[in-house]
Amino acid sequence: MVDNDSLLTTECGRRRMVEVILRVTKGTRIEPKPYEKMLLDQFVRGELTDDHVLTLLNAVNFR
């Protein structure tokens, strides 16, 4: 069983979560675009929180 807290609090957990997201969305209309992948990479490294990523994505989508 995976500790859900560690998915967001460790780089390894964030990387695993993003890898699953990318695998599931690959080849679909919701596959992340380059800008979104850049944000996910910053999230994995701990440079952005999940809330920051969502805020930035919302700002781009409402232009």
Image: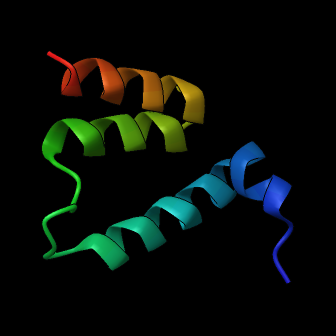
Q: How far from the left and from the top, in percent, is residue 31?
A: 21, 62
**Does residue 12 sit above or below 20 in this rendering?**
above
Q: Give the x, y percent position of residue 24.
A: 35, 78
Horizontal relation, residue 45 to residue 6: left or right: left
3 sits left or right of 19 in the view: right
Quarter of image, res 40: top left
Q: Residue at x 44, y 34 (%)?
A: 42
Residue 41 as seen in the image, left or right of residue 13? left
Q: How many numbered markers are drawn?
A: 0
Can the viewer see residue 49 in this picture?
A: no
In the rendered image, the vertical position of residue 58 relative to residue 59, given as above or below? below
Q: What residue is rendered at 42% in x and 67% in y?
A: 21
Quadrant in which the C terminus is drawn:
top left
Residue 41 in the figure: left or right of residue 61 = right
| Image quarter in which the N terminus is found | bottom right
Name of the residue lying farthest toward the bottom: 1
The answer to whether residue 23 is seen in the rendering is yes
Which colouring convention does the figure follow? rainbow
Residue 29 coordinates in the image, percent (x, y): 13, 65
Rendered position, 49 above or below 3? above
Tell me the residue at 34%/67% (across/down): 22
Image quadrant assignment for residue 16: bottom right
Q: Position of residue 56 (x, y in %)?
A: 36, 22
Quick check: 18 above or below 48?
A: below
Q: Residue at x 15, y 48 (%)?
A: 33
Task: Farthest residue to the front: give it.
Answer: 62
